Amino acid sequence: MAIGGGLMAAPATPDSENGRYSMTPIPEGVLRLDTRTGTVSTCSKNGAGWACYVVPDERTALDAEIGRLQAEVEKLKGQLAAGPTVSGKVDEALPKSDPLKKAEPKSAEGERKIEIPLPSDQDVDRVMSFLEKAWRRLIDMANRVQKDVSGKI
């Protein structure tokens, strides 16, 4: 029993190159796991032989981005702790008026009126003439269509 217990404690994979990779078949070829580094690769057979390509590790990219953001947060905290840096004279009060608010119209501007000229009688006559011609043409076209349809039936 002591011998059996000693065998159970032995490592599952030997230290030699033979136990380094774990292969799993996939439709495209083989999925290879490097048991020492944790790198995953897809291997496929092409005209020149087998080729393995490392599968992108999203966790590494996420960890790098988290590290970058943490460094940026620390930098900003340091700037905030240093206090605000204001240049120039600050003893004077700021003006109380809102520069974006429109000023009240002056009396001359408030009295200004917009005048729109009305069309003359000649302009009205021209529009009426155009509408009458368009209406006559529409009626003539409807009559022709009605005659064509009634003649074919």
Image (cartoon, rainbow, N blue to C red):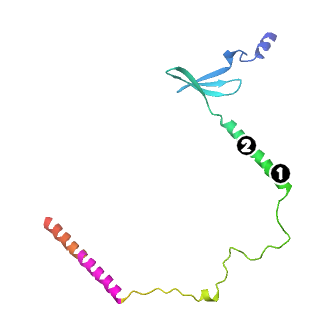
Tell which residue pokes out farthest to the front in this image. 88
| Element marked by disc 2 | helix
Residue at 69%, 36% (x, y): give it: 60
**Gap between marks 1 and 2, in whole Å?**
18 Å
On screen, residue 117 above or below 42: below
Residue at 71%, 23% (x, y): give it: 36
Dot 2 amino acid type:
Ile
Is residue 101 visible in the rendered image? The answer is yes
Return the mark for residue 78. 1
Residue interval drawn in magenta: 121-137
The answer to whether residue 134 is left or right of residue 147 is: right
Q: Is residue 135 magenta?
A: yes
Which quarter of the rendered picture does the C terminus lie within? bottom left
Mark 2: few/some/many CA within 10 Å (<14, 14-19, 20+): few
Return the mark for residue 66. 2
Measuring from the top left, give residue 69's x and y in whole percent.
Answer: 74, 46
The quadrant holding residue 1 is top right
